[in-house]
Amino acid sequence: MAEQLLMDEAGAARLRMIIEAGAELRGADLLNFALEHAVTEAGGLGGMVHVRGPGGRGLLLMASSGLVRTVAQDWEEIEEHGGTAPARAVTDGVSVWTPAADDDPGHDSEVSAAEPGTQGDSPGSAHESAPGDTVGHHPHGAAPWSPASALPEGSGLLAVPLLTPGGTAGALSVLTVGKGQPTLWQRGAVEVLAAWAALRLRDQWTGSDRTESGRLREKPPGSRLPKEPSAALLRQALEALKMGSWEWDLDTGEQIWDESTLAILGLEGESSKQTFETWTQLVHVDDLPWLLVEIEQAIRNRRVSAVEYRICRPDGTAGWVSARGRVLPGEDGRPARMVGTVWDTTESRIARDSVSRALLHMSEAFFAVDGGWRITFVNVEAERFLGASHDLLGRILWDALAEIGVDATELGLEAAYRQAAESGTPGGFDVRWPTNRRWYHMRLVPVPDGLTVYATDVTEIRSQEAETATAQRVTADRTARITELTSALAEALTMQDVVNATAERVMAPFGASGLVFHLIEDEMVRVAGAVGYPQPFLDGVDGVPVSDITPVDEVHRTRMPAFIDSAEEYVERYPDRVDSPAAINKSAWAFLPLIVSGRITGCCVISFTEPHHLSGEERALLITLSGLMAQAIERARLFDAEHTRAQELQRGLLPVVLPTLPAVAAAARYLPANEGVEVGGDWYDVIPLSGARVALVIGDVMGHGLSQAATMGRLRTAVHTLADLDFAPDELLNRLNDVVNDLGDDFYATCLYAVYDPVTRTCTFGSAGHPPPAIVHPDGTTEFLTRPPDPPLGAALPPFETTEAVLEEGSLLVLYTDGLIESATRDIDRGMSHLTKALATAAAAVQDQDEAASLERLCDDILAELLPGQQLTDDAALLVARTRAIPAESIAGWVLSDGPIAAQEARNHVRDQLADWQLDELAMTAELLVSELVGNAVRYGRSPIGLRLLRAEGLICEVSDGSLTTPRIRHATETDEGGRGLQLVAALAQRWGARYTATGKCIWTEQPVP
């Protein structure tokens, strides 16, 4: 509240100063003064003043501020009882605000009632609109009148009536910013200035409404101002404004001038009826020709005419007048009459002439055009590139420019000038003038009646700026490259990173054409990297003793740089190397020692194709940079060695080759991350299981580093161990989760474990936070076996869920890690969609190839599509398996009888089936194995007892029963009667084992097939 009072007091003081400053103004000057300050106080874009015209002609525009000519023309004359804000303010005697271009019939403008005698109160007396207040809806509703559409979009128009004791004389309007209503202060300030202007006009018209003390006579309470002012009051208003009205019959030439017009033109007391010839005799002889052309065009185009010209009165005095006229059609639609106003502008013209004299001799070129693009003023400096002013004034700007050979369209002058005039926004640009080839800065300043142009010759300034900019650009470019080199070397990891960073940021600034790094180890030279040298030359100096390369040997021994400016100097200094410059096409060199911690590690050679002398500053800079390069190279050497060891460790933990199995044919790829020395924890595996089944596993230990790689090795070993125990996927993940939990709280891993059975063609898998596997069917369609994933290992709470799918023979089962599909620029959903397209394309491309070769190419194509040579921030692993099925004729199964007879039945079935398969040589061993397994099932198990034979890469015999008790080998003594059966099985079978089934257990053996 205190801040609001402070603002009101400051604003009120400012208004008092404005009113005191304009105390001596009269007429049009008074209206312009009040309007300009009203626009300023309201923070508006512009404004205008309308007064009532004689004879019911409507509201005439008397003054405008900040409005371009095209906008002001639409408001030259408006209907007094129309829907515009000024008309409504005059009609109702209240302030009206409405948004510009208000075409919404549902929108009501804001109307602020002002009681007679209260308009001049302090701005703080205004109040907000509220229910029950004197603010309400205008009875006419919305005002769909075209001039409002000419105002800027997003603005509003605040119109305040000019209230006088005799009625409402007109309205003062301010174009406000934004569609929101003016603030209390803005509305009040405009009302105060409008009230002051109205009272000053009243004082100039009549003093009858003042008391002897000079105060205004008070009106009876509740009285309203008359809606229509008297004719006498209008005449007094026009006289006070030095403004007259006139009417011209275009057919007869007869003109009717009111008393003010007669007085302005020096014919006071003459008849109001005059002729066209009388008017032409009063016009200055130099102004008459163009004035007649303007009037003729206004009549032909039926537009408003606004002109200012000189007159020569009968008493010998001269002056300036401004006239506005509007063409009115007759009953036949043709122009019949012209009506308008005229006012004396001699005083303002004198002021403008004094300004013109200052502009005439100013150092900048200056010219002005009116709304019709006629040249109205050209100063002395502008004549240098436009031509003599007496040949230009009154001419169309574009025509004048064309005559001196200037294409305004090609140079962009016309577009820029028109844009500035139409938008009302100042602007500027540089242009090279065609006639004298000099550069000028054109500053465009729109004015209400046209456009002014300031042209400053900036040729010398631009030349100096160009020279300075060139020098600064060279210096800045070199500095920037050196700064970039420092940053790049600090970030460089590998030796190749150092070479690339140095080549990109040193060679260009110094104009070099070659760069080579020689590392010296045990007095031998090794080329660590090079740019701009032929490969045969590099091969010739790689691995040779340092003494064989004389310049490098000198730098190595002296630890001092060597700079050679030409090939002749090179031959003179090193006669034993006379053929070197010609062999490598180099003519100048800089040999820089690479010193780290007081130890020289090599030499950096920067070479030039042409003879080149390096200045002292350049040499000092290169010596400084050589220290940075040496440190970066040392770090890169350590990094390369460490990174190589880390990758060897990780690759050693992954399968060397994938096993060849009857159930699937598989291929895999692993790509380590490019960034950082730390390795990742991605792994994959293919594990043969009993019953010709196969386990496919892929996982990712979260994080990077040797610790994660070691964890990956532990998990891979644990998976192998658990798979050998034939655990189902969910049980295996349960136990693997325990292993990860035992490693500590900071270890997490994702894993997908799938088991494929070629007998039933079913794939059962479980996932611990891993992306789902993809299936490519033989017809080429691709799908993901999606299901809500369980949390990663180390964060999961068992049990794990499993999913089962039946796969057609020849389907592709694709397992991958998130590094393949996800990156900083690609989320996982987009990555899976990209993988789907890549799989479909790659699978179609390898249909006719050999199975093993097709899988290898398939992996390469997928990696090339998803990771096309980009820098990897995470490891990526890919495992692709093509499924196979065991044919029905290679499977045989029986349900055996209960009791000892089961062993005999099993032997008979085995003997007969092996005979059918032509495997008689395996029959004896197989019978013995089956007999022992069935005997154990009869003795220790429960029915039903089953037997199944599988012919795959080996002969698999499986005996199942309903018991969950698994056998174990016992070491029987010499006197024990039992305990030797499983020892016999282990001795005769290539592999044997036991696994749980849905109904019990299964004991199996495997024999090699010859």
Image (cartoon, rainbow, N blue to C red):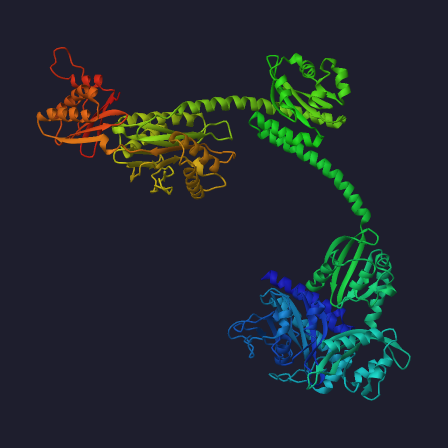
Q: Is residue 42 above or below residue 732?
A: below
| In the image: residue 19, left or right of residue 979 | right
Residue in the foreground of this view, choosing between 379 and 569: 569
| In the image: residue 82, left or right of residue 835 | right
Residue in the foreground of this view, choosing between 848 and 358: 848
Which quadrant of the structure image shows residue 301?
A: bottom right
Residue 702 makes an appearance in the image: no
Q: Is residue 410 above or below residue 691?
A: below
Percent position (x, y) of residue 565?
Answer: 76, 23
Residue in the foreground of this view, choosing between 520 and 3: 520
Residue in the foreground of this view, choosing between 184 and 218: 184
Could you tell me which residue is drawn at 65 percent across and 33 percent down?
483
Could you tell me which residue is drawn at 65 percent across and 66 percent down?
42
Could you tell me which residue is drawn at 49 percent across and 39 percent down?
824
Which quadrant of the structure image shows residue 520?
A: top right
Quadrant of the frame with the C terminus: top left
